[in-house]
Image (cartoon, rainbow, N blue to C red):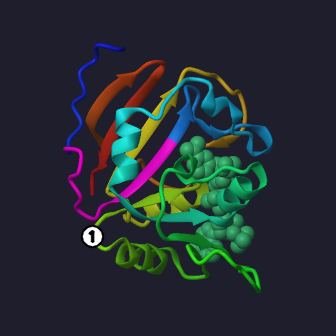
Amino acid sequence: MDDMQSVIGSEPGDVTGRVLWHVTMSLDGFIAGPNDAMDWAFGYGGPSPVGQEVMQSTGAILAGRRTHEVGLRGGLKAYGGAWTGPMFVLTHKPPAAWDDPTVTFLTDDIATAVATAHAAAEGRNVVIFGANTAKQCINAGLIDEVVVHLMPVLLGQGTRLYDSPETAPIHLDRTGVAGAGQLTDLRYRVMK
Ligand SMILES: NC(=O)c1ccc[n+]([C@@H]2O[C@H](COP(=O)([O-])OP(=O)(O)OC[C@H]3O[C@@H](n4cnc5c(N)ncnc54)[C@H](OP(=O)(O)O)[C@@H]3O)[C@@H](O)[C@H]2O)c1
């Protein structure tokens, strides 16, 4: 994999205000292990150049409440704390008080939430975190690109990347394949 040529469709620094689903996934299609375990994702090096590029082009993050909570519980920060910017957290029950000014809780429908994040990103990309949240976005046609870091591990159970038996297949156009150490980076444009 190390010599696999990157065919990423956009150049580093190419900032066009897209909506990206950026996710790390086990080979068997899980983005979290049982009980939201994420330890499996950190044993293989990284971040890869693709991950760095995505991070650097991100102007805002839209996450589900569960992703936010798991991060708080495990001391996990977006991009390991290397990224700073506005984060929006979708929830039906926002906390009464919150002292981190970079985090805003939203109770909106998914399209309004993405639009809010888009406006805050000021022309840079919006990254979506969380399986349920990303599913709503992609089912509503709100995601432009899917970027997956494929890990060489089989989890057997956990949170699936995309669990949506009610929807028709969503077709993707592969725009990039790259390898960095044990990671395989896959990049897709969502066909609309
Ligand atoms: N591998 C990776 O790259 C990666 C990245 C991100 C997250 N994760 C993992 O994925 C798991 C979380 O994903 P998930 O699918 O379980 O949950 P999620 O998408 O993070 O959060 C779902 C929650 O978001 C809120 N929500 C979503 N849409 C909403 C809307 N339109 N209006 C109001 N609230 C809304 C609801 O919270 P309320 O119940 O509060 O209403 C819902 O229960 C965690 O284990 C996390 O660690 C992995």
* Residue 83 pos. (x, y %): 47, 55
Residue 36 appears left or right of 110? right
Q: Residue at x 67, y 30 (%)?
A: 40
In the current view of this chain or complex, which residue is farthest to the bottom? 96
Magenta-drawn stretch, dominant element (helix, strand or loop): loop
* Quarter holding residue 34: top right
**Quarter of the image with the C terminus in it:** bottom left
Query: Can residue 165 be seen here?
Result: no
Depth check: 29 or 23 in front? 23
* Residue 81 pos. (x, y %): 56, 52
Depth check: 19 or 68 in front? 68
Residue 189 appears left or right of 79? left
* Residue 58 pos. (x, y %): 38, 58
- Residue 50 against residue 131 in the figure, above or below: above
| Image: magenta residue range | 11-23
* Residue receiving disc 1: 123
Q: Is residue 155 magenta?
A: no
Can you tell me which quadrant of the image ligand 1 is in? bottom right
The number of numbered discs placed on residues in the rendered structure image is: 1
Q: Residue at x 50, y 74 (%)?
A: 110
